[in-house]
Amino acid sequence: MTDDVDQHFQKLVDAGRPVGEVIGINNFLIEIKGLQPVSTHSLVIFENGNKGFVQHILETRVTVLNLGSAQFKIGMLAAVGQEELTAKVGKDFIGRVVSVSGDPLDGKGPIAADANWPVFGPAPPIYERELLNTQLETGVTLIDCLFPIVRGQRLAILGDSKSGKSTLATQIAINQRSTDQIVIYVMIAKRRSDIDILLQRLSDSGVMDKTIVVVSTIFDSLVSSYLAPYTACAMAEYLWQVVGQDALLIYDDLTAHAHVYREISLLSGVSPGRDSYPGDIFHAHSSLLERAGKLKKNHKSLTVLPLVLTESGDISSYLPTNIMSITDGQWVLDMEVFRSGLRPAVNVGLSVTRVGAVGQNEHQRWQASQVFKILADYRKAQEFTHFGAEMTLTTQQLLTIGAQINQLFTQIPGETYGLLAEQLMLDSLLSGNVPGSLNINTLKKLANDTAAAAKPGSDYQNLLAAIKSGFGAQGTAS
């Protein structure tokens, strides 16, 4: 094994690759003298077989982040292996759980890679993109109605710890079992219990077969956790640009990634900026998120959902505002809404989608406007109830339909609906065809069954009538 390593390193030297000498070792940070000319993110091969990549190029030395586990010593030689760091990618990664280096973690045997793809690749230029126009079905009624997302959009999920960010992302991933999209879910510096919960949910829902899960735990090195989202993006880009497959990429979460990057930068001696984050933290995330979009050449898209932690619900802090300025909207999860019992706990006043409405038809936009108006009036009516005054019939009706809409919008993990079922449910409520005493769960079941049995080209009004006629058969138990 040692002879193979020596021969490989010698080939690089004989090929005239730049060579340098190790002059400093600080855990995973390796200082190298020489190694010029070299560019940032170049792959470096050490004579002991370890690999690393260039993080900083200084006047007299180069800082390399070590990816291996072998021991170092001062005076060891290093050579430039490739001009850029690459990741193993391919169709066989679908349905697997892998590490940041692409090694399988699910015990299902080795994975044959189709190619290598740049980890820090550039975003597609504007002239290679096309306008977004296809709604992405999340299966979450509140989101699909009020804050829709289109394929190719970048939309952030913000919220406090334990407000349901990962649960919402998992719901959206689960709903892709009924679409043609591949899901790439990356967990950054997570606890093993969180990883197990995600894998269990994906397996139980039957969507694991079309999902790639890239895992980085809190026990992995900082370098692995730093590379995790970039490696996942490389896998998604290959499926999107080469295979021609629509993909949904979920970063869980970019706050943990920012913390890891801050630690690496501080250890590297980079001057700290606001909140001790390095000055290029915005570039680190923008270069990652801007790689999403839709291509002209194959009309396929890569959609990105970054999760971001907000401390005490403060979405105006440094990291959340950074991500919000890069993305095309955000779903804000609020602990007050969470405590009120609404799931997902989306704050309707703070959430926004800047692109998603283009994927909706005219009727969906009408539904959204009606629901927004009803929810606003509902909140005002709730304030009046605190005074104990006698309510008018109109106010009582408003309180009833507002409560019904909130109950309709409440979904447990794994509970998802198609766009047709969601529209049928909303129209049934907005048209007043639903008795005030009807159990909303009954309406959900009726709409789901009706949508599932509907044939292409079915008359929409007939479907609504079928739901109305089902009220008597199902009963109106509250």
Image (cartoon, rainbow, N blue to C red):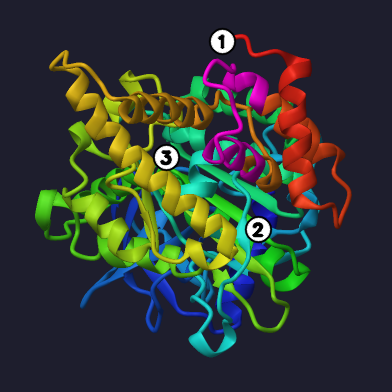
According to the picture, the residue beneath numbered tag 1 turns out to be 478
Question: How would you rate the neighbour count of disc 1 (Cα within 10 Å): few for under 14, some for 14-19, many for 20 or more?
Answer: few
Q: Quadrant of residue 297?
A: bottom right
Q: Earlier in the sequence, mark 3 or mark 2?
A: 3
What residue is shown with label 3? 221
Which residue is found at the position 21% from the left and 19% from the top? 385
First in sequence: mark 2 vs mark 1: 2
Residue closest to the far top: 477
Residue 391 is left or right of residue 300, and the answer is left
Q: In terms of sequence position, does the residue under pointer 1 or pointer 3 come before the other?
A: 3
Segment tinted magenta in the rendering: 423-443
What residue is pinned by disc 2? 247
Of the 4 image quadrants, the one containing the C terminus is: top right
Q: Residue at x 42, y 53 (%)?
A: 369
Q: Nearer the viewer, residue 361 or 85?
A: 361
Q: Position of residue 250 (x, y in %)?
A: 52, 48
Disc 1 to disc 3, how far (Cα)? 54 Å
The kind of secondary structure element at disc 1 is: loop
**Residue at x-position 76% and y-position 44%:** 178
Q: Residues within 10 Å of mark 2 (few under 14, many from 20)?
A: many
Kindly identify the amino acid type of the residue bearing the numbered disc 3: Ser
The crowding category of the residue bearing disc 3, from other C-alpha atoms within 10 Å (few below 14, some 14 to 19, many at least 20), is some
Q: Where is residue 334 shown, x and y percent of the image?
A: 30, 33
Q: Residue furthest front?
A: 393
Q: Please, is residue 420 above or below residue 413 in the view?
A: below
On the picture, is 385 further left or further right than 308? left
Give the distance between the C-alpha atoms of the residues marked 3 and 2, in whole angstroms: 28 Å
Q: Which residue is depicted at the point 63% across and 67% down? A: 301
Report the mark closest to the observer, 3 or 2. Answer: 2
**Dot 2 lies on which element?**
strand
Circle 3 SS class: loop
As drawn, the label of residue 393 is: none
